Image: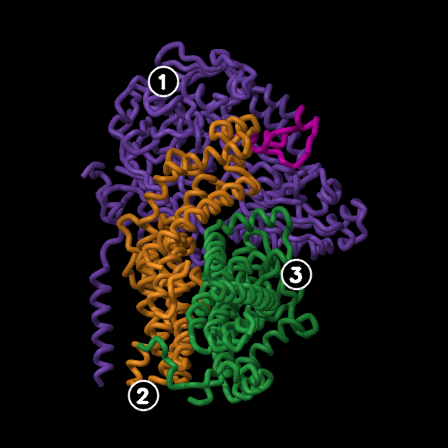
Chain colours: A orange, B purple, C green
Amino acid sequence: MSTAHFISYRFAQAVFALFCIVTITFFLNRFAPGNPFLDEKAIPEHLVDNMKAYYGLDKPLFTQYLVNLKNLLVGDLGASFGNKGYTVNEVIAQSWPVSARIGLCGLGLALLLGVPIGVFAAAHRNSRIDYGLMSLALLGICLPTFVIAPILGNIFGLRLKWFDVAGWEGSSAWVLASATLGIYYAAYIARLTRGSMLDQLNQDYIRTAQAKGVSPNKILFKHAFRGGISPVVAYLGPALASLIGGTFVVEFVFNLPGLGQHFVRAVTNRDYTLIQGTVIVFATLILVFNLLSDLAQVWLDPRRKLKT
Amino acid sequence: MVPHRLLALTISALAVFSTACERTDRATRAARDKILLLGNGAEPKALDPHIVSSVGDANILRALFEGLVTYHPSDDSAHEPGVAKRWEANDNFTEWTFFLRDDARWSNGDSVTAHDFVYAYSRILHPEMGSPYASMLYFLKNGEAYSTGAVTDFSQVGVKAPDDHTLVCTLEDPSPYFPDVVKHTTWYPVHQATIEKFGSMTDQFTLWQRPGNHVGNGAFRLVDWRINTFVKVERNPHYWDAANVKPNGIVFFPIENNFTEERAFRGGLIHYTYVLAPSLIDWYRENRTEVLRSETYAGSYFFRCNVTREPMNNLFFRKALAAAIDRETIVRYVTMGGQQPAHGFTPPSDAGYQPPDVIRFDPAKARQYLAQAGYADGSDVPAFDLIVNTSEQHKAIAEAVQDMWKTHLGITRVSISNQEWKVFQQTILDLNYEVARAGWIGDYVDPTTFLHMWRTGDTNNQTGWSSPDYDRLLKKAAQLSDTQARYAMLYQAESILLEELPVIPLYWYTRVYAISPHIVNWNPLLLDNHPYKHIDIRLPGDNPDRPPYN
Amino acid sequence: MPSTPTASTPAPPAPDRVEKGTSLGRDAWHRLRKNKLAMCSLWFLLAMVLTCYLLPFLPLIADPNKTYPDLKSLGPFTTGESVKGPSVFYSLGSDYLGRDIFSRILHGGRVSLTVGFLATSVSLTIGVLYGAIAGFVGGRTDAAMMRVVDILYALPFLIIVIILTTYFGNQLWLLFVCIGAVEWLTMARIVRGQVLSLKKQEFIEAAQSLGLGNAAIIFRHLIPNTVGTIIVYTTLTVPAVMRLEAILSFLGLGVQPPHASWGSLIKEGADRMISDPSLLVFPSLFFAATLFSLNFLGDGLRDALDPKTSKD
């Protein structure tokens, strides 16, 4: 099957998957307890009814669903319940560049650190270097982002004053946010790379190459690496999607106006339209990056053929 | 040797880099330009006074709009003239006439007239507007009836504009404290032409609140609004008192994470933190006491009891629970912000109302109540839940109280349950709980803002409690125009509330925050509504006589 | 790179392994015992689990929920005199309500270890089976199965948890369902990728030509050959699960205050990083020590289970 054919087939699947996600999310929203108008100071019931009528929430559920679907088809995500005066399209347009920048830089750092550490540790298996590097990686895994982020803020923001500790416009706090994500994901990637590199180094074809006297470096980078990186690539699909789709903790700690903050706040506000909007963005990222990750895995491993 | 030299080189390079970065911080630069940088909690829901309901949103609106009467920068009971230059009431305080100043202007240059106020009140009370805070306007005659649709003709509502500069408000009940009420954001005027340019009067979703479209009548006008980033306002040249407005602008930063906000403050990014987390108070007390403020705030922290459910339907059991809480310990070691242990429900105000002094920590009496409730010791009390919405502070208080009930009453089967915010609201609204944490902040300086909610069937009652005597006393108090007599009546009503305990008071709030020492005239206020035009910024070495511009 | 790499090694290892299936375990144990680091880790983990589970029978461990607010934030190895009467000794200091940190960590460990191991096994089982089947069967089944994974990734997990807790209340099985439901997805993707690449290799084709059933191929050949990656990813799942548990407890699912888990203790500590660093440091140390030993044990197991290792 040609790559083009494969991609178009996967595209059709993705559209269907997106439809399922939208449908399930719509009904999940409506079954969640509470509604967008519930607040600490209770609002009289007749006013809640009027607001529901204004937003069309008084109609039968299925009618609401159809209206919603019709609007989605023309790309209209609706008005936000929580940010009055903004449409969901505008909210997402304002916030995705933030998440994309933090996520891509974070991931870049993670790959730059994680993959070489993993390969190097695998090549020096069970040596002091291996244990040292892996302990470092483990440290990154043990420290959750909500611990690393404030520590980075305290050291590089307050003590050394290299970066700002919060904010987006005219602020450098996003660097610390990316660094937090980079450290965390680098640790994962390093462990994963080492593990699968070892799997590859034990494969028969590597032994054959060794027996034939191919240089260790060539074996490592030319032969083992292609197969060894495959699980990392499989892991990267969803990881990249969740990095770009918004990472609540770092956005919250560095006060960055990204998608992650919007999603979590939309859930606590029961902002139905904004929940749906952020879920659609995230779903699209998942479908796209998982496709790219599948393609990359095939490219790395010529034995595998593109299968629908 | 080479690696060492490399290391030394790197370190010195980093040192150079870091000194190069030692520049004046944002807060100092802004202070030089006389711009206030304020942390403001959550992202504002809207910039339309008829849509918002939270305290943080009101903080921004106070810069963009001005009511008939405004807040005094230091005295809670004083009334500063706003759009109205003077006002008078009839003998029994049911009819108020406001005389508007001629030079009040909207930020686009139009005159602010009495008709703008009438329009605003017809909008907020309109049933289709669904304004969450419309009940503040129920002071007006037929205000509630119009809002519920019982009266459809707005001319029957008690607000009239006989001419451009006179506004007459006719009230349901005598309210000598009415000037306090009209300071609230819900009583601000709105600009009819602007609202209707971008949609119908009752549209919730219109673009009129956007930068460039927004028209207000406050000391400041909207420059920019980026979601989750900031709201920027600058001085409004059309404002009638523009010459006396001290700051050139204000930037409100929505920073929901208390720890981030505090780091932003320490890192010189903002002048003022909206809150200071309790776990940081001790550190500030020891290290930065010059920026720490802790001020009395008109708010009450309490537990709601669902009196329709076992075991909370038992009055003696509620009394036992209330008497077994050591409030002194909670404010001293858990909340730490100088809060006052509550001996009543309504927070006392220095000049005015004093609540009954009846709630007390008394373990012996608590055990006696428990026995009267029919329980030999705590272990036979049926299992019940104490629900809190997710927050470290609520959790810590609940844990402390749970242990007090265990120690003093022997109650073992009380569990704490965290609930997500909306689930928590729904659970309480459905009366699907036993004990729930709650807090209430006053809207204006009068005990009724704390006592009205406990009337039978009030939307904010949510305890299932109902007392005809209480309702009757509140109604009677509303008819009184003499303040002392009215307070006495309210005192009686509150005594009933505290005798029957549908709520267990814990403490009275304080506002704890950090503020830059350069900010001048930011005084303690019971309602925390600071009029920004009086706030000044002075850097050391500043000439106070310097003109506000340049 | 040769696409048919094993031309010169004629004997595929697989059938050979089937025959000595029983001795494989014993061999592995032998190899594991030689690995000092892995053995230390194993003993440490056992000690940790035993301490946490036998806690109620241990003397000298304070009640983890007893508060002495006037003795809050004391340092390690201090004795405080409470106005309530007793004098209290704190081995690792006291927290913000004057509770014993050491005791809270041990009690929290019980929750975290249970959740960590059980939820990880759930996600491990589902993830490996699902991924192996999808990869091995391939075609439309694979496509359908993987799109289901994509959909599950994208659904708003927070809302699902909120709904489930509202309807079913705070129940233990629900906690495992919720954690299991998210954590198996990446495992399935990784295993599927590995299986897709393995199944084109000679030893699998050989096994097929020998007439081995699909189940046998999956369990005896495909899964054992990805065991290294699986072990590594499993050890990475444990901390993720423990952290997720803390998040869920904020939504009202799982351990509720005043009870603690390592996740919730670390979260509390992170909030009090400046004022009281020991609240962050001590729980993190226990968490980290457990994870380190788990990972070293995992690496040791991986080496031990791999018969080719001994030739190195």
Residue B529 lies in what quarter of the image?
A: top left
Out of A168 and C205, give the one closest to the viewer.
C205
Magenta stretch, residue numbers:
B444-472
Q: Position of residue A19 (x, y in %)?
A: 45, 44
User: Is A123 positioned to the left or the right of B383 in the image?
Assistant: left
Instruction: Locate the N terminus of chain B and report the quarter of the image it occupies.
Output: bottom left
Q: Is residue B449 magenta?
A: yes
Q: Quadrant of residue B60?
A: top left
Can residue B294 be seen here? The reply is no
Q: Say which amino acid is labelled 2.
A: Lys
- The single residue placed furthest to the top in the displayed view is B162
Discs 2/1, front: 2
Above or below, comparing residue B142 to residue B24 in the picture: above
SS assignment at label 2? loop
Q: Which mark is residue C231?
A: none
| Residue type, numbered disc 3 | Lys
Give the number of the mark in front: 3 or 2: 2
In the displayed structure, would residue C189 be above or below residue A63?
below
Q: Secondary structure at mark 1?
A: strand
- Residue B495, percent across and down? 67, 34
Q: Which residue is mark 2?
A: A212
Give the left or right position of residue C127, taking residue B514 as reference.
right
**Residue that carries the numbered disc 1 in the rendered image:** B100
Q: Residue at x 65, y 56 (%)?
A: B403
The image shows residue B11 at horizontal and vertical percentages of 24, 73
Q: Is residue C249 visible?
A: yes
The numbered mark 1 sits on a residue in which chain?
Answer: B
Q: Residues within 10 Å of mark 2 (few under 14, many from 20)?
A: few
